[in-house]
Image: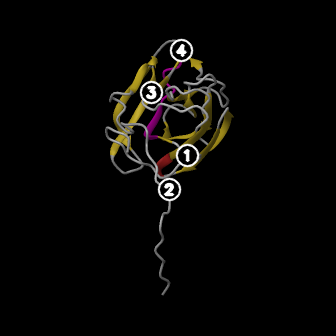
Amino acid sequence: VVQSCPSLLLEPASTNLIPYSEDFSQSGWNNSTYPVTITSNSIISPDGSLNANLITPTSGSSRHAIVNLSATATGGTTYTLSAFVKKGGSRYVVFGDAGDILWRLVTADLDNGVITNEYNSSGTITAYENGWYRITCVITRTNPASIQFSLGASETSSNSGLPFFDNTSLSVYAYGCQIETLSYATSYIPNFGQSA
């Protein structure tokens, strides 16, 4: 009889700097700067609950992304942004920080599960069940200002900024957003109102 051995998950202590990591209707989240519609509880998330959000661009040629400005950066410090995403109507998703003097973004292909572009950042993508991926974007900030955590669809596989487009079919599902003061992502830390 083969018995599996128990294992320990050893990670450093970390904090999720996004106060509402799952509920995009709460304070700190903005869907009007880069206009999108947020539909809460649209699909089963990686935790098995009906609590993932659908992000849908509104009409008009514009940038389209959900934004969170809750975390304040220290200049010269490295941060890892992460989020769970799943393909809606868009093959590509763009994700990262739009709040510094330089855009810091990764673009991912949700058909093939690969990072297709890293712009002033480095990224990873990890497959989960039911078509979900966890994407990371590692950045080193120049200025001490808000991290503009941004996530939205893209028509293309390479972006040097949040892209302009006019296509309301380019939706993406998102859940479990996180910012950490580390050079890599730890396990997801759910947050329901304050830094956790």
Residue located 53% across and 14% down the image = 62
Is residue 69 in view from this perspective? Answer: yes
Residue at numbered disc 2: 12
Residue at numbered disc 3: 69
**Mark in front: 2 vs 3:** 2
Assign a secondary structure to mark 1.
loop
Cα–Cα gap, marks 2 and 1: 9 Å
**Mark in front: 4 vs 3:** 3
Residue 95 percent across, percent down from the top left:
55, 33
Task: Give the residue type that dot 3 points to.
Answer: Leu
Sequence-earlier tag: 4 or 3: 4
> Which quadrant is the C terminus positioned in?
top left
Residue located 62% across and 22% down the image = 101
Q: Are marks 2 and 1 in contact (CB under 8 Å)?
A: yes
Task: Give the residue type that dot 1 points to.
Answer: Leu
Residue at numbered disc 4: 62
